[in-house]
C-alpha cells in the first residue's frame, strides 16, 4: 500500500480527503504508526464528496473528463488527487524536445514550460507521461529549473507521474519556468508518435523531434485530436530538415491533443 506525498499533503491541507478503500486502509495504518486510538483519524473523515461538479475550493472536472475521458490512465495514475490535478496553475507556453534512437525508440523527452499561478499557494506542477514501453529500464527524471518531488512509476498503467516543485509558494498570477527531462533505457518497442494533451489554450506549443541519423523515418505528419478517443484531424505531412529533425508549431494551440506521428521504412533484411 503506497500513498504519495502529494496526496498526504492534500489531506493535511483539507484540499481532498481519503475516500477510496485503499486510502482508508492507509488512514488505519497511520493510526497504528502514530500510536493513536482506533478510529481517531477515521472519525475526522467527512462524508464522501460528490463527483464531477464544481464545488467551492474544488476543481471543475468537466475539462479533464472532456479531454481524458472517465477512468482514464491519467485518473487511475493520480487516484484521488486527480480531482485537484494542477488546479492551482495554468500553462502558458510549452516546448518539448523528443529524441528517437537508432532502434526507433523514444529515449528522451525534455519539457520546458511556463506556468502561471491561478491562486495563492501554488507550489508544484504534476507531470503525467505515458511510456511506450513501461518495462524499459531505467527511467530517470532530471530537473534543471525547479526541484524534483515524488516520482511514481506505474508499469501496469504504462505511466510516470512526477511532481516538479517550484521551491516556494507562488502568489496569484505569478509565473515560473520549469525544465525537466525524462530519460528511458533501451527498448525494443518501436515508437510511432508523440503528443501533448492540454486542457487550456496555450500561447505557444513547440514539439521538436530528433531522429537518429542512421534511422530517419519515411515520413512525418502533424495532427490534432479533440480528445483521447477522437480521430486525428488536420493530418498534414511535414518535412525532415537537414539535421533529421521535424517540428510542430500550431498557429493556435487550443484545448485537445496536438501531436506528431511518423512512419518507418520497411526494415532492411540482412543479406543471405
Image (tube, helix red, strand yellow):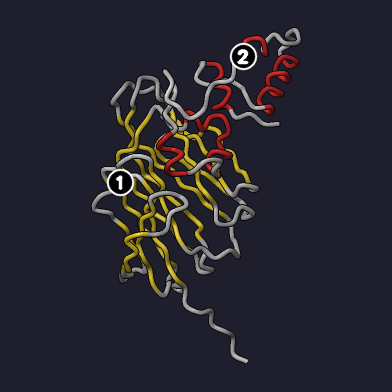
Q: Is residue 236 above or below residue 118?
A: below
Name the side, left or right, on which 166 lies relative to 150. Answer: left
Q: Nearer the viewer, residue 108 or 65?
A: 65
Q: Position of 156 compared to 215: left or right?
A: right
> For residue 271, what is the image quadrant?
bottom right
Quadrant where the C terminus sits is bottom right
The tag on residue 254 is: 1
Q: Residue at x 67, y 12 (%)?
A: 41
* Spatial separation of the CA atoms under disc 2 and disc 1: 39 Å
Q: Say above or below: 229 vs 82.
A: below
Q: Position of residue 263 (x, y in %)?
A: 44, 71
Residue 180 percent across, percent down from the top left: 44, 43
Most extreme residue toward the left is 251
Q: Secondary structure at mark 2?
A: loop
Q: Which residue is mark 2?
A: 45
Q: Residues within 10 Å of mark 2 (few under 14, many from 20)?
A: some
Amino acid at each position: 500500500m503506497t500513498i504519495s506525498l502529494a496526496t498526504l499533503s492534500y489531506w493535511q491541507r483539507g484540499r481532498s480527503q481519503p475516500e477510496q478503500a485503499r486510502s482508508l486502509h492507509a488512514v488505519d495504518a497511520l493510526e497504528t504508526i502514530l500510536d493513536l486510538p482506533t478510529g481517531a483519524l477515521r472519525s475526522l473523515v467527512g462524508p464522501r464528496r460528490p463527483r464531477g461538479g464544481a464545488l467551492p475550493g474544488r476543481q471543475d472536472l468537466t475539462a479533464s473528463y472532456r479531454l481524458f475521458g472517465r477512468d482514464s490512465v491519467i485518473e487511475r495514475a493520480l487516484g484521488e488527487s486527480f480531482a485537484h490535478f494542477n488546479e492551482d496553475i495554468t500553462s502558458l507556453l510549452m516546448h518539448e524536445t523528443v529524441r528517437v534512437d537508432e532502434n526507433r525508440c523514444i529515449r528522451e523527452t525534455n519539457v520546458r514550460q511556463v506556468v502561471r499561478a491561478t491562486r495563492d499557494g501554488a507550489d508544484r506542477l504534476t507531470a503525467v507521461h505515458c511510456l511506450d514501453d513501461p518495462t524499459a529500464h531505467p527511467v530517470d527524471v532530471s530537473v534543471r529549473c525547479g526541484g524534483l518531488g515524488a516520482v511514481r512509476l506505474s508499469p501496469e498503467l504504462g505511466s510516470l507521474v512526477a511532481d516538479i516543485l517550484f521551491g516556494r509558494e507562488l502568489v496569484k498570477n505569478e509565473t515560473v519556468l520549469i525544465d525537466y527531462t525524462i530519460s528511458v533505457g533501451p527498448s525494443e518497442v518501436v515508437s510511432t508518435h508523440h503528443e501533448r494533451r492540454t486542457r487550456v489554450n496555450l500561447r505557444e506549443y513547440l514539439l521538436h523531434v530528433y531522429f537518429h541519423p542512421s534511422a530517419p523515418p519515411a515520413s512525418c505528419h502533424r495532427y490534432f485530436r479533440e480528445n483521447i478517443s477522437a480521430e486525428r484531424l488536420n493530418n498534414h505531412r511535414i518535412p525532415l530538415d537537414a539535421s533529421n529533425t521535424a517540428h510542430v508549431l500550431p498557429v493556435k494551440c487550443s484545448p485537445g491533443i496536438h501531436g506528431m506521428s511518423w512512419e518507418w521504412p520497411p526494415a532492411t533484411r540482412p543479406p543471405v
